Amino acid sequence: MDSHVLQEYLDKHSFRVVVKKRKNYLTYEGLQDRYAYVLKSGIIKTSVISPDGREFNLRYINNLEIVSLLRDEYSQFIDAPFNIRVESEQAELYQIDRVQFWKDINQSKNLQMYVKDYYRERLMYSMKKMQQMLMNGKFGAVCTQIYELYDTFGITTKEGLLIDFVVTNEEIAHFCGITSASSVNRMMQQLKESGAIKMQDRKILITDLDMLKDHIIL
């Protein structure tokens, strides 16, 4: 997915930039909104609420990307498909009138290709995530989520692969559909005792990536 196409489009327009602080929500699932949003800087998290009121995390986003689905081309207002919450100290997002955005997309082949790739990648991600959650079991799901966090925030250090972002066990539980953070605590302790991970300044340090991957059906 070529983000340069999206950046060029944004650079040609003077879209309003919305600034939100940490833990503030940009949208709520089901709330009507007339805008599409593109992350400019910062880290956000998308999530949905189950019928019984539990939160299920979808993914973290930390790069230039459309963060709200576009849905149909003509409705001025649509229901937000998920919650969007700021996880960094602050985040900046371009706010674009969604009907105008679709008009611009339909007039640009490059933007059309970007949007097609965007939906294709989101679909493949969702399918892979569902497969991993169903096939790996709870312990494998936690390992899968740690690996995904490494893929999003990982940096190489002398000690190992550092997930350079503080993620609580409760948040990991919400990503894996596990109701109790204490269950994740036990699994994290098991990974520490096996030598796969350790904690460094409240951040996860992967010390044996192969051992972690042994528990994942990729």
Image (spheres, rainbow, N blue to C red):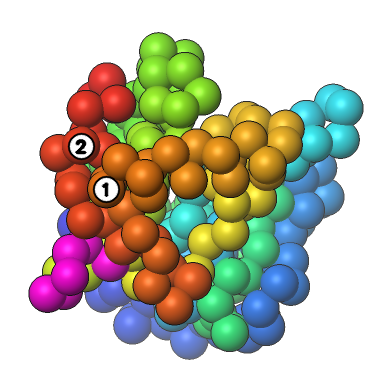
Q: Distance between the residues labelled 2 and 1?
A: 8 Å
Q: Is the magenta stretch mostly helix, strand or loop?
A: loop
Residue type pointed to by label 2: Met
Q: Is residue 146 left or right of residue 19?
A: left
Location of mark 1 (residue): 195
> Which of the image's four quarters has the C terminus?
top left
Residue at left 38%, top 49%?
192
Provide residue 162's location: percent of width, then percent of height.
28, 67
Question: Which label number is shown at residue 211?
Answer: 2
Q: Is mark 2 on a helix, strand or loop?
A: helix
Q: Is mark 1 on a helix, strand or loop?
A: loop
Pick whichever, 168 or 182, lies toward us: 182
Provide residue 3's location: percent of width, then percent of height.
25, 63
Asked if residue 216 lies in the magenta stretch, the reply is no
* Magenta segment: 157-162
Question: Which label number is shown at residue 28?
Answer: none
Q: Is residue 106 left or right of residue 57?
A: left
- Marks 2 and 1 in Cβ contact (< 8 Å): yes
Residue type pointed to by label 1: Gly
Task: Name above or below for residue 53 compared with residue 104.
Answer: above
Residue 205 visible in the shown view: yes
Residue at left 48%, top 86%?
14
